[in-house]
Amino acid sequence: MNRSATGRRLRRWASGLALTGAAFLVSTGAPARAAAAADLAIERGRYLAQAGDCIACHTADKGAPMAGGRALETPFGKLYATNITPDRETGIGTYSFAQFDRAMRKGIAADGHNLYPAMPYPSYARMTPDDMQALYAYLMQGLAPVKQANKPSAMRWPFNMRWGLSLWNWAFLDATPFKPDPQKDAVWNRGAYLVQGLGHCGACHTPRGIAFQEKAMDERGDKGRSFLAGETVEHWRALSLRGLWTVDDTALFLKTGQNRFAAASGNMADVILHSTQHLRDDDLRAIATYLKALPPGDKALPPPAVPRKVVAGGLPDTLYTSRGGLGYVQFCVDCHRQDGRGVPKVFPPLAGNPTVAAKDPATLLHIILTGGQTVATAAHPRAFAMPGFARLKDAELAEILTFVRDSWGNGGAPLSAGQVSRMRAALDPKTDSSAFETPRLADMLGSPNAQQLLRGMRLHLETRDLLPQHVGNALNCTSCHLNAGTVADGSPFVGVSAFFPSYAPRAGRVITLEDRINGCFKRSMNGTPLPPASPDMKAMVAYFDWMKRETKPGDKVAGRGVGKIDPQIRPDPENGRKIYAAQCAVCHGNDGEGLRQADGRYVYPPLWGDASFNIGAGMARTYTAAAFVKRNMPIGFHGKFPLGQGGLSDQEAVDVAEYFSHQPRPDFPDKVKDWPKDKKPADARY
């Protein structure tokens, strides 16, 4: 069958899908109207292809759309998705509609060979005849043909013998199209149709039987409680969808990849990227309505309708008293916060997150070892990355994850180092397991002065709350000294106390560590100094001394300070404004006002204005700020451990630093005392 013949047939089919009267227009010789009807069918088919997420499987990484080649891992070997473009030699260009319909409903290709049910034809069988014709119209007429040969499958014996699939179909396939339930309303039925059919949600979310069949294809009958009750696929846990959240929350998640409970990860991120974000709002609400109506499945409890409440001011009792809690403080708090709430539209919450609390921790272990990334959708075009934490030891990760699962009412069971180790082995070589050398906060618990060290660490983390009489703005020490002062090139505290007392050009004299700390209170925090002999100052110094380890005054400490940037780079503040809007505003506000929680507490600090650092701070100087930004901002920018931090070019860092550092900010009264003997830096503000 040639392309022109195919086109004529499609127009005849399309006429039956158009509004009443279209067939009459075709029969009376109105070719323009017939073509318009065909176009409508193609566009409808395009929408159905998105609903069916065809592109996710049938497009290889960086490959031509729908041309196949993507590897699909199964427990029985590897399959490769086929070319479904209308190319006549390597695609489906020679398929008649009857052959296409048979492939979609019965898993039998045009040449008669059986398809593996990794292609979810048991779900697609539920499509209506009209939808099937529209999808065929799109694939044949709406796609450009791509000549790309299909790759042979690599299934192990005996699964490489396809004749057994005929028996599988006989035992498990029901090719009956979807039948609406007359006892339910139109919204419920539309949701059921999309979930059971095109959406093929059960392919991942329904438990599999002994022959790898889905235990149920819908909610009906004795087996219906297994439908969408959760399954583990490729080391990801596809959670139970039964009774899922509220209708609004589920629709929002499918549209944006995020809601107040969670952010999409694993294969679900691809589903949202390629499929559900493109669906109409009424279809998303229909899906959500159907899922919400499903009662708890076998051995499953429904997710909460509202996020679980956090306890006692939002801080778990074990945050500062357990190894897992202190590991969380060191490696997780900068994004997920002490109260586990995350940062709305940026970093997902851990409190009430179903992935965290799931009985099967596969997804949680997968993400912690390999990292992840939020979905870039029309609603949230900026994607944020979480690096993999595989550089931490199995025992450390088990401690942190056990703390997270036990906190904020999550109620998850403890995890062991053995569970982490087994997942690491299953994912290798996808994980970077090289050692990460830095002091571990959890080790403070074994120190003789543990309580003093913990106080010093908390003063760093919660400076504004614990020392309100000394902090005059919205900053904490951790605003600059990331991960409790342990990040290389983030002005870490590691080894620093070994270099004091030392000469400071800005002061024109030898200063102590206490002097240096008080310089931050006066400049970065626009406040007043701590008395050097006070218990809190002693606690901060003790924390620095604990991080000194074996460092001696003449030693070189890798990652000390914030690095350097070439002062010959000329800043472009207008470009800096654009970079700020694209990369910084989401956390620090469009007008530099910072980001607050609903209760008014700051999540991320303002970068200018009365609540920001004053002109005496190093961050008010272009090249100091640029060096910090270059290596530390934005966080969540890529998959580099520990924070996905940094990533701008030198020029971009200088431009954005020039822009925000020269915005209005408080004066520094003691500026007249600075650099009494030594030459001022070229970028000094006074």
Image: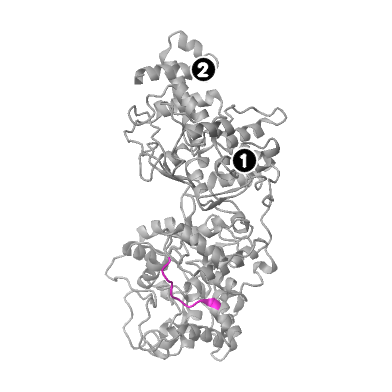
Question: Marks 2 and 1, Cα distance to the nearest angstrom?
Answer: 36 Å
Left or right position of 425 against 284: left
Depicted 168 relative to depicted 42: above or below:
below
Residue at the (62%, 32%) spot, across then down? 190
- Looking at the rendered structure, the kind of residue marked 2 is Gly
Q: Which mark is residue 518?
A: none
- Residue at the far right: name it: 183
Residue at the (47%, 70%) spot, across then down? 665
- Looking at the rendered structure, the kind of residue marked 1 is Lys
Please report the bounds of the magenta region as a residue range.
433-442
Quick one: SS at disc 2?
A: helix
Left or right position of 608 against 358: left
Q: Which mark is residue 215?
A: 1
Residue at the (43%, 81%) spot, across then down? 671
Q: Give x and y (percent) for residue 110.
A: 42, 26
Q: Quick one: 112 or 362, which is closer to the camera?
A: 112
Q: Give x and y (percent) for residue 574.
A: 36, 58
Q: Which mark is residue 16?
A: 2
Residue 610 seen in render:
no
Q: Is residue 408 magenta?
A: no
Q: Earlier in the sequence, mark 2 or mark 1?
A: 2
Q: Quick one: 43 or 155, which is closer to the camera?
A: 155
Residue 491 seen in render:
yes
